[in-house]
Amino acid sequence: MQYLQFANMANPELIKALTASVFEVSRAELESPIRTNRLAIPRAVAMQIIRKNTRLSLPKIGKIFGNRDHSSVRSAVQKADKYCNQDETVLIARHAIQQNFEYLMQRKSA
């Protein structure tokens, strides 16, 4: 699998790396203050997947993404579902990130 290079990262960093790879953006761009859809959509998806798969609080997730406020994280997590409902490619990308994350986590624990 092409994502094995990310297997030794901490969970949030792993999710950011997978998201960046799937959406073809850099991890630095995910953390940047730029709010274009090209970056806002993958950032929202990454935040949602981190929220779902870790015990990190909204403020801690915000810190991972360039010191964003907890309300920005909450809004992004909610918008991720909207983006998925509006665009099937975003839904497929989110599913691919989640599946790759679960696969890599299983490999870590094996």
Image (tube, grey):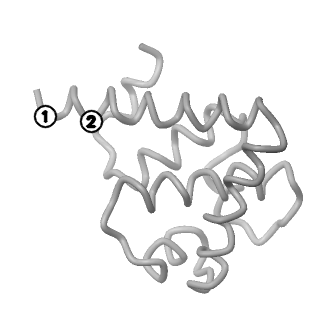
Q: Classify 25 as above or below 40.
A: above
Among the 4 quarters of the image, the one containing residue 108: top left
Among the 4 quarters of the image, the one containing residue 78: bottom right
Residue at 55% across, 28% down: 96
Q: Classify 5 as above or below 78.
A: above
Distance between the alpha carbons at the discs numbered 2 and 1: 6 Å
Q: Quadrant of the N terminus?
A: top left
Mark 1 residue type: Ser
At which x and y percent is residue 32?
Answer: 72, 66
41 or 1: nearer the viewer: 41
Q: Quadrant of the C terminus?
A: top left
81 or 49: nearer the viewer: 81
Residue at 52% across, 35% down: 97
Q: Secondary structure at mark 2?
A: helix
Residue at 66% across, 28% down: 92
Give neighbour class at mark 1: few <14, some 14-19, many 20+ (Cα, 10 Å). Answer: few
Q: Is residue 83 left or right of residue 12?
A: right
At which x and y percent is residue 55?
Answer: 30, 67
- Of the numbered discs in the image, which one, if any, rests on residue 109? 1
Q: Secondary structure at mark 1?
A: helix
Instruction: Determine contact: label 2, label 1, CB under 8 Å.
Output: yes
Mark 2 residue type: Met
Q: Which residue is mark 2?
A: 105
At which x and y percent is residue 30?
Answer: 67, 57
Q: Is residue 22 left or right of residue 1?
A: right
At which x and y percent is residue 73?
Answer: 60, 74
